Image (spheres, rainbow, N blue to C red):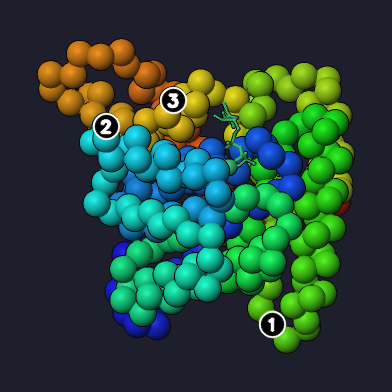
Amino acid sequence: MADGEADFNLPVITAFSFKGGAGKTTLLALLGSAALASGYRVIFIDTDSTNNLSSWQGAAVQNGYWPDTAQLHHTLDADRVTQIIDDAYDTRSADLVLLDTPGFATKALDQLLAVSDFVMSPIQLSQPDAVSAVATRDWMQAFYLRLGAGSPRPAHCFVANNVKNLSRLSVTEQKYLERARKDFALVKTMVPHRATLAMMTDKGPLGEIIKHQISEGYEGARISAGHSTELLELAMQVMNDVLSHNVWEAEDA
Ligand SMILES: Nc1ncnc2c1ncn2[C@@H]1O[C@H](COP(=O)(O)OP(=O)(O)OP(=O)(O)O)[C@@H](O)[C@H]1O
Ligand SMILES: [Mg+2]
């Protein structure tokens, strides 16, 4: 996608949070789906021993939904992660790296965060997530101190995920949204709860599923094309928010 040498940029977006099941893998698959649908070449790196992202790729390959513009690497070795990113940079073979982490403190975690340009933490608008998000935020702060003043630091933000109804938040969601805006760098776009996302997790990149379902001769069940297109657009908006650190400021909250 980049033409000249000087323009080449390979952003590394990492999903990280101490709360299991908040949506790290889902958000990465969604952002990756949107980037692939927009013609970007994407490298997914799965550093989680539960292999969720790798299983997603496995299913996608089986279904014929894995485009050749996507690569997936699974490794628990942080040095290998650095090497994959360096190689992609040197060969200009990708436009975006999406890195999934297991979400618990390991020695490798610091190294994974250090090779990231952007770190994104999903948060659900509920009490348990509000508590664990504090631990995630504080871990990032401590990580910045460990990095030292001279080193480049990844920008960190939270993304509200699994929101029941974006246009009409429940009283509880509203309460935790207000808190999250004040306490965390929360990006402005929120991701709704959608069955389509669970289906994406089972089958492969969302854009590829849509392409297949609108192709001639397809007779299986269809997902709502409107919903899926809207989700891909929303995912691009989330990605832009993450890349530009478009978060709620105190005066907006
Ligand atoms: N916005 C959403 N809409 C519907 N389902 C969602 C959404 N976000 C997450 N889920 C579902 O919640 C479950 C947990 O999500 P996911 O696996 O992405 O979390 P995680 O943070 O990666 O978990 P882990 O810490 O175990 O790696 C999955 O079944 C996923 O399909
Ligand atoms: Mg996961």
Q: Is label 2 within 8 A of ligand 1 (CB to nearest ligand atom)?
A: no
> x, y percentage for residue 251?
85, 50
| Residue 141 falls left or right of residue 101 | right
Q: Which mark identifies residue 151?
A: 1
Circle 2: residue type: Asn
What residue is disc 3 on? 199
- Give the mark toward the camera: 1 or 2: 2
The residue at label 3 has a CB less than 8 Å from ligand 1: no
Q: Quadrant of the N terminus?
A: bottom left
Residue at image point 53% right, 66% down: 77
Q: Residues within 10 Å of mark 2 (few under 14, many from 20)?
A: some
Measured Cα–Cα span from mark 3 to mark 2: 13 Å
Place of residue 95 in the rendered image (x, y in percent of width and height, measured from the top left): 38, 63
User: Going from the N terminus, do you reach mark 1 or mark 3 first?
Assistant: 1
Amino acid type, mark 3: Met
* Element on which disc 1 rests: loop
